[in-house]
Structure formats: C-alpha cells, structure tokens
Amino acid sequence: MQETFWQKRLRDVAAVLVVGIFMFPLFWWALTSFKPTSAIFDKDGIVWFNFKPTLVNYQVTMLGKSRAELAIESGNTFGVGGASSYDSRQTIIDSLIVAVGATALTVLLAVLASYALSRMRFYGRQAYLNWILSQRFMPPIAIIVPVVFMFHYMSLLDTRLGLIIVDTLINLPIAVLLMKSFYDDVPVDVDEAAMIDGASRLQIFWRVVLPMVKGGVAATAVLCFIFSWTEFLLSLFLTNSIRTLPVKITTFVTSTGSEWGFIAALGTTAVIPSFIFILLVQKQLVRGLTLGSLKE
Amino acid sequence: MASVTINSVRKSYGGFEVLHGIDLSIANGEFVVLLGPSGCGKSTLLRMIAGLEPITSGQISIGNVVVNELHPKDRNIAMVFQNYALYAHLSVFDNMAFSMQLKKVPKEEIRRKVEWAASILNLTPYLDRQPRQLSGGQRQRVAMGRAIVRDPSVFLFDEPLSNLDAKLRVQMRTEIKELHHKLSTTTVYVTHDQIEAMTMADTIVVLRDGHIEQIGKPLDIYDRPANLFVAEFIGSPSMNFLSGEVAAEAGRLVVRANGVSLPLPPGANVTAGQVVKYGIRPEHLRPDTGGAGIPAKVSVVEPTGPEIHIYADIGGQEICAITQDRLELAPDDAISLVPALDRIRLFDPTTGKVINGPNEAPPRTLMRA
Ligand SMILES: Nc1ncnc2c1ncn2[C@@H]1O[C@H](COP(=O)(O)OP(=O)(O)OP(=O)(O)O)[C@@H](O)[C@H]1O
Ligand SMILES: [Mg+2]
C-alpha cells in the first residue's frame, strides 16, 4: 500500500501519542521519587519541576537509613518519623529469587511438557489440553485456602521455595499453551528429517527443535517473570517475614498516612530488573512475538 | 545403493485402510516416480519406506534386508521433504554436516564431504548462510545436500518441487535428474505432477485410492494406458473419450456414438453390440479440411504457439484435437477429424479396463533406441 506524506505523519504522531500515554505514569512515578514530601503534595497545585531533587526516598528504601539519621545528618528536622521497616533491600533480593526461580522452573517444565503435547499423540491428549486450559480460568483466590493448609503441613509457608512453587503452579498452564503454539509452528518434518539424520528424541529436542523456538522461550520467560515480579495476592497470604515487592509496598500505606515518596522510589526501582531482563531477551522476544518468522 | 521390495503392503489409520496391498519392486539404481492424485497414498507409502509410518501388514525390504522393524536412521535412507524441513537455526554447512556430527565423523571428513556436496549443488558460496537467507531453489538444494552427504542407499523425495515457481521447477527437475545420473542412487520420488513424472522417471507407478493402477516406463504408460483412470490422468490436454456402441457398417466394425461413426483399427478385439469408450489422444486426431474423417463442429480454438488446440463437438460429445498446421479456424466451422487408427484405445466403460489389451504390438511410431 502506498502511503501519502500526511498518512505517514499521522501514523508517527499517533505512535508517539500512544507511547506517551503509556510512559507518562512511569515518568511521573520516577519524578515523584526524587521529590521531597512537600513537593509531592502541595496545597497550591501540582509541582512539575520546581522542586529541589532529593535522594532521601532512595536512601531510606535502598540504603536502609532511617529518617531520624538523615535528619541529624542534614540538620533538617522536616518529616522525621520514618523507621527502618522502610528498608527494602531484602525485599528486592527475595523478589528476585522468587521471580527468577519461578521463571526458571516454569520454563523448564513448560518447554518439555509442551514439546510432548505438540509432537506426541497419546490417549486423552485433547482432554489433557483442555484441562490445562481450564486451569487458566481458575482465579488464584479460589485455591488460596487449600494452598495455605497444604503449605502449612509441608512447612512451605513463609519460604521463598513456597512462593516459587505456587507461582510456577499459576504460570505453568499459560506457559505450556504458549510454548505449544511455538512448537506447532515448527513443521513436524523437521523432527522427522532429524530422526532420519540419526538423532534420538532427546537430540531432536535439544539440538534441533528447542533452538528453533528460542524466541518463544524468551517470550514465555518474560511473561512468567513479570507475573512473579508483580504477584500480590498469593505472597500476601503465604508469607509474613518474607515480603515480595508488591506486598512490601502496601506496608508503606500506614495508619498515619501513606509514604508516597518511598512508594515511588521502590516502584521506580522495581521497574529496573524487568527492564534489564527484557533488554537481554529483546532480540529473541521480537522474533518470538512476530509469529511466522520461524516458518519455512 | 540397494533395491527396494514392497510386498503386499497395507496401511490403515484406525480402522480405515488407505493402502490396499501394494506390490512393487524397485531395482538398484532405478528412478521410480509414485504418481497419483491428492490423497491416493503416495506420501504414506514413501513414509513407510522411510520408517516414519508403521507398516500395518506386508513387508518392505531394502537391499534384501526386511526393514519393517528398523528405525529410520538404521535404514540408510535419505529423505527430501516438500517444505525442505531445514534446521532454521543452523548454517547451510551445519545443516549438511548434522548427520555426520551426530555420528562423530572426524571434522576433516565432514568438511570434505560437505564441500563435495556443495560443489555438486552449486552451494559453495552459501555455506555460511542461514536457510532464511536463501531462495527457494537454494533451500531445496541444501535439503538435497543434506541427503547426499550421507551416501544413502535410497533417496526418497516427497513432492520436493511443489513449493517452487514454474520456471525453477523445470530447472530443478533437470538438476535432480543430473544428480541421479551422477550418483545412480536408487530413488523413489513422489509427485502429483504428471509432467514431472514423465520427464524424470525410469519407471512410473500410478496410484489411485491406495491401489496401483499401472507400472511402466513413462512412454509405455502414455501410449498404452491400462485403464480409463491412467489414460485420463496422464497427458495434457487429456485423452478424448467418446461413449458409443460397436456396430457393423459396410462390412467393417465401427463405433456408433450419437449417430456418428468412429472408425476402428482392423482386428479390434470387440464384437458388434458391445458398449465401449473410444479413447484417442488429441495429437492423434488430425484435422482434415477435405472432409474424409469424423465430422465435427469447432467450438474453441486455442493457439499455444507450437501448436493449435482445437476444441470441437462430435455428435454432442466434446473432444480436443491438436495440430501443428497453421489452420485458419473459427468457432462453428465444420471440420473433419481423422484418427490415427493404431493409436485408438478402447475401454470397457464398466470396468474401466482397456479392451484392445495392454500386450498388443508397440505403436508404429515408437522410436528405436
Ligand atoms: N495420520 C493420518 N490419519 C488418518 N488418515 C491419514 C493420515 N495420514 C494420511 N491419511 C489419509 O491417508 C490417505 C493418503 O494420504 P497421503 O498423505 O499418503 O496422500 P498423498 O497421496 O500423499 O496426497 P498429497 O498429494 O495430497 O500429498 C488420505 O486419504 C489421508 O486422508
Ligand atoms: Mg503427499
């Protein structure tokens, strides 16, 4: 299709607009994290850039300083009252362990299970697929009570391993279905050609088919990681001393008021690992998401 | 290299039989084409030879070894697939080297063999490329390279050219034939394209609905089709069939079709009153403006360049005639068509079998080698 000059311009403008709409909250959050409390809530209106940037919010959440220490250091007594419970370093470490662990476990299981579902014809295969799909319909809240009991008896409550297992449980159905669609795009002829070339089932999987769907693996991993990274409900119920990021952030909303500066600082920091992760797999991800590039 | 013997082989999917007892023996070094319409079971038979489909009953041997229970990799066959089935993540070199790498062949030998195959197939400049950076014809050659480096005793091809455009198809046809000439490896080649079959095969096996309809050399099959199906399937435009009844007329036998008399060769194996299908290929119907043949009325004239296709009506039945003469014809012109008597094929309309026997003397114009 031939585009006119103005059609092209219009499309560019629309693209910028959409990106702008999606990026603005992120930008605003990051901006807020550098504001002193007085600039976050100003009774005279919205503060854009006319504030004195501060690292206090990061010093408290990321370096574990209490406000009292900071106030003494700077000789400024404004906003004293923060406690060491705002220190979020352990939270980030725990969240990373849980998210990376759950992603690795999910991808490992999904990559194997979906290969079998895509390639092998066994009795009850379709029913099995439907069952997997049905697991996806189930809201996590529906299983929370039995899971709490089971975890209690297995001593998995308040452990990182417990969170890894439960996140894997929730992610596995969609990961399997997603990976299966990637495998389905690789013609079975490729497996057969490799079989004739002398490869065993495992060699076919490991040396031929898996490398051909690495874009799909990347896409699946990103999906799992983001889910674990942002999962709230299950970690709230299953842990109390281990606090993952979303749960930790809610503790900043206290009976005496919300610490918006800390929330913004932690929220901004939380974006970074996802960002790095997506950056790492970006090339694969784009190929994985633009289906069909693997074909032929 | 090896011969292939297929002995009353059957194949069922669930309770549904798709191959009904196939018997076929393929000589060492022979190029056999399995030809038939879509769904007739060509691929199934080929995949059974490869070991990709279990054999329901019967026996397949390769070089005197029964292979029914052998794993594909132990049959020493190589297969080229319709969609090439290349390893998309590997370079052209590694695609070809893969089977040898699995067998832990020394690196030096792998290199030597891949380079040998690449030079035969004109792939040397592309060895470092990925399959997606190649054209369709080049990909097809990589697939063939992957097959030949293994020194297989049998090559299996499943419609390898159907994804290529018409021109490339003709070129690759020649290349595959040359390759066969160089390597003389026994080859089984599946296609539904009768031109491909005619041009490439030593022997054509015509299949329909899981049955073998005829086995023979390309020209034998063309000249002496054993039944209506083969006669109609091979040749383009296909053979003309006129329904009629044998009758005696002026002391000789003719076929009467809707009031038109069609001449028969002397000594035809029919009796008066017999209902037949009168088969004649378009190029064996000579238009004669003098009026000494079957009267016909022109309906469409299609010049193709080397020849003219004349579609005409004989007593209400549509036929096609081909001539190289530059005739000036228009629709509704009356012409007469003279059949080459020794090329007429008569078929039994109920069984479809040829009546004047597949064992009659070769046609007059058959050239001596
Ligand atoms: N896995 C299967 N399950 C059930 N029926 C099958 C299966 N594979 C093939 N068939 C049937 O077997 C018959 C022969 O199939 P086959 O693929 O051999 O045909 P073909 O001659 O190669 O056709 P084409 O020219 O379209 O490739 C068809 O009727 C098909 O529907
Ligand atoms: Mg087929």
Image: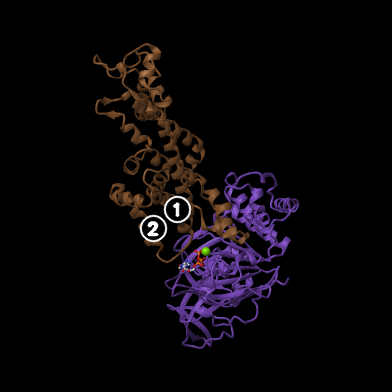
Chain colours: A brown, B purple
Instruction: State which chain disc 1 sits on.
Output: A
In the depicted structure, whether residue A288 falls above or below residue B233: above
Question: In which quadrant of the rendered view does residue B305 lie?
Answer: bottom right
Name the foreground residue: B80 vs B198: B80
The kind of residue tagged 2 is Leu
Instruction: State which chain disc 2 sits on.
Output: A
Give the labeled residue for mark 2. Answer: A129
Q: Secondary structure at mark 2?
A: helix
Residue sticking out furthest to the top: A75
Left or right of A8, for residue A255: left
* Callouts 2 and 1 close, C-beta under 8 Å: yes
Q: x and y percent of residue A113 in the render?
A: 46, 55
Question: In which quadrant of the rendered view does residue A96 lie?
Answer: top left
- Measured Cα–Cα span from mark 2 to mark 1: 10 Å
- Tell me the quadrant of the picture where the C terminus of chain B can be found: bottom right
Q: x and y percent of residue B109 in the render?
A: 75, 53
Q: Residues within 10 Å of mark 1 (few under 14, many from 20)?
A: many
Q: x and y percent of residue B6 in the render?
A: 60, 75
**Going 24% across and 16% down the picture, which residue do you hit?**
A43
Have a look at marks 2 and 1 and say if they share a chain.
yes
The numbered mark at residue A49 is: none
Question: In which quadrant of the rendered view does residue B158 lie?
Answer: bottom right
Q: x and y percent of residue B16 in the render?
A: 44, 74
**Going 51% across and 55% down the picture, which residue do you hit?**
A187
The kind of residue tagged 1 is Lys
Give the labeled residue for mark 1. Answer: A180
Left or right of A59, for residue B134: right
Name the foreground residue: B42 vs B241: B42
Query: Residue B164: in sight, yes or no?
Result: no
First in sequence: mark 2 vs mark 1:
2
Q: Residues within 10 Å of mark 2 (few under 14, many from 20)?
A: some
